[in-house]
Structures are given as structure tokens and as C-alpha cells.
């Protein structure tokens, strides 16, 4: 989706827990989100700060849906510069699970690029949770369910896609070459990422009660 002189901005939304299958219709759930701009998906995590990954392929989460947010009035490089301007406000050390997470980053980026916010349901759980933040262990507040992979870097000249580090005929978790990966293999990988995310969340919940 593109228009002359404009860049599509797409919000990719991921599930962080199985219960989303039931609560999503009620406008509630635990979600991760990233913005697909010019073929790179931008998100935010503790440690990594603003980072990029392949669209719809965030580690530790299960892709749910893409939402076309609109068109940025400029090139993808112009859009990257806008996202770069958010770097100082979204450093890795600033991450907070409730008040400054991947969804608050996506929301701010959409406001800067398009002048509109992301759908409110995506960060609603964290919003309500922020009222109980005093009960959350400090170390838990800084942990991101989805880990950053490639930090964002910029130059004055067009660069290669930041996700090239994932290229090549690597071996998947089940021993299958990525060049010959079937839909079943991809589903297995998604399930393993989901299981890993669920394990981290369950561990975090147990820590919060200890």
C-alpha cells in the first residue's frame, strides 16, 4: 500500500497471552505492537530502546493483525527521521512495562507521523495496571515481554534493511532450513515464541507475588 510521495504506516499487533482470544472482543488484553514503515517494523524494549525487526515477526509474541493507520506525507527515510527524533525519549533504560512500553512508543510515533493515536484497546491493560504500579516490583517494571533485536541506526544515505542480519539459509528451532520452511514449520516457530513469552509472563506474575 503506497501513494506517490507518501509512506504507508501499518500497526502490527501481537498477542502476549492466550486469553486474548477471549478478551480481545471486549477491548482488553495483553498486546505487543510495532509500526511497519517502509518495510521495517519499529518497536521499543528495555535495553534495546527503539529497534527494528521483520514485519509481523516479533520474537516472543504471536502476530494477531495489521491495522492500516494512514499515510505519512513523505518518504520512508523522512519517516525514519521522525522516529529518530523519539530516541531520546525512548531509551532502553526508560522502559516501563506499564507507563512506557512498546505500545506507548507506537502511539507516540503514530501521533508524530500521522497526528492520530493507536486504538486504545492495545494499551488498555497497561493503562489500568499503572494505577497499581506501586505493587509491581521495580525489576519487573523494566522487563519487556518482547526483546529488542536490532537497535535503530541512521545515516544520511539510504541503508540496507536492518533485518538483513536474519537473512541466509539458517536452521530453525526444529532443525529445518529456513529456505525450505513450510507453513507447518512456521507455525511451530510461532508456537515456540508464544510459549516462551507465556513462560516469561508467568514467571513475572509469580515474582510479583513473592
Image (cartoon, rainbow, N blue to C red):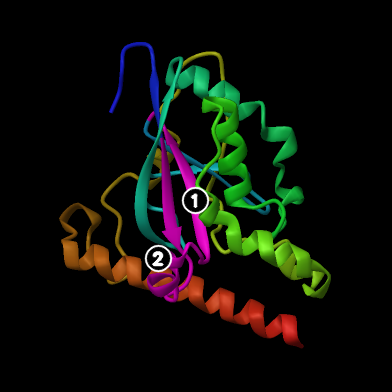
Which residue extends farthest right? 134
Q: Residue at x 58, y 81 (%)?
A: 202
Residue that extends furthest to the top in the rendered view of this protein: 5
Is residue 15 within the magenta segment? Answer: yes
Q: Which residue is drawn at 52% across and 79% down?
A: 199
- Counting labels gives 2
| Camera-nearest residue between 54 and 163 | 54
Q: In this view, does 210 lie above or below 153?
A: below
Classify residue 23 as left or right of residue 86. left
Q: What stretch is highlighted in magenta?
A: 10-38
Q: Which of marks 2 and 1 is nearer the N terminus?
A: 2
Residue 50: where, in percent of width, then height? 61, 41
Point out the image quarter for the N terminus: top left
Distance of label 2 from label 1 (alpha carbons): 17 Å
Local crowd at mark 2 within 10 Å, few (<14), some, or many (≥20)? few
Quadrant housing residue 126: bottom right
From where the camera sits, is residue 175 visible? no
Q: Mark 1 points at which residue?
A: 33
Residue 133 among those drawn in magenta: no
**Quadrant where the C terminus is found in the figure:** bottom right
Q: Which residue sits at x=74%, y=34%?
A: 88
- Find residue 86 and report its horizontal and vertical position in percent: 67, 32
Q: Give the structural element (helix, strand or loop) at label 1.
A: strand
Query: In the drawing, what numbered circle is on residue 25?
Result: 2
Residue at coordinates 37% horizontally, 58% vertically from top-left? Answer: 63
Amino acid at each position: 500500500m503506497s501513494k506517490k510521495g507518501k509512506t504507508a504506516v501499518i500497526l502490527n499487533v501481537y498477542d502476549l497471552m492466550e486469553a486474548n482470544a477471549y478478551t480481545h472482543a471486549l477491548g482488553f488484553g495483553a498486546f505487543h505492537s510495532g509500526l511497519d514503515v517502509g518495510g521495517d517494523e519499529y518497536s521499543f524494549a528495555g535495553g534495546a530502546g527503539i529497534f527494528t525487526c521483520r514485519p509481523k515477526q516479533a520474537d516472543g509474541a504471536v502476530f494477531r493483525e495489521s491495522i492500516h493507520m494512514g499515510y505519512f506525507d513523505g518518504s520512508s527515510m523522512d519517516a525514519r527521521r521522525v522516529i529518530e527524533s523519539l530516541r531520546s525519549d525512548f531509551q532502553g533504560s526508560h522502559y516501563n512495562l506499564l507507563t512506557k512500553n512498546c505500545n506507548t512508543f507506537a502511539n507516540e510515533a503514530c501521533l508524530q507521523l500521522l497526528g492520530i493515536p493507536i486504538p486504545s484497546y492495545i494499551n488498555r491493560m497497561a493503562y489500568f495496571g499503572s494505577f497499581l504500579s506501586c505493587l509491581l516490583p521495580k525489576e519487573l517494571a523494566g522487563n519487556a515481554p518482547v526483546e529488542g533485536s536490532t537497535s535503530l541506526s541512521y545515516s544520511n544515505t539510504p541503508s540496507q534493511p536492518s533485518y538483513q542480519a536474519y537473512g541466509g539459509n539458517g536452521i530453525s528451532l526444529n532443525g529445518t532450513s529456513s529456505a525450505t520452511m513450510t507453513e507447518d514449520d512456521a507455525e511451530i516457530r510461532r508456537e515456540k515464541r508464544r510459549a516462551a513469552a507465556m513462560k516469561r509472563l508467568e514467571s513475572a506474575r509469580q515474582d510479583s507475588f513473592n
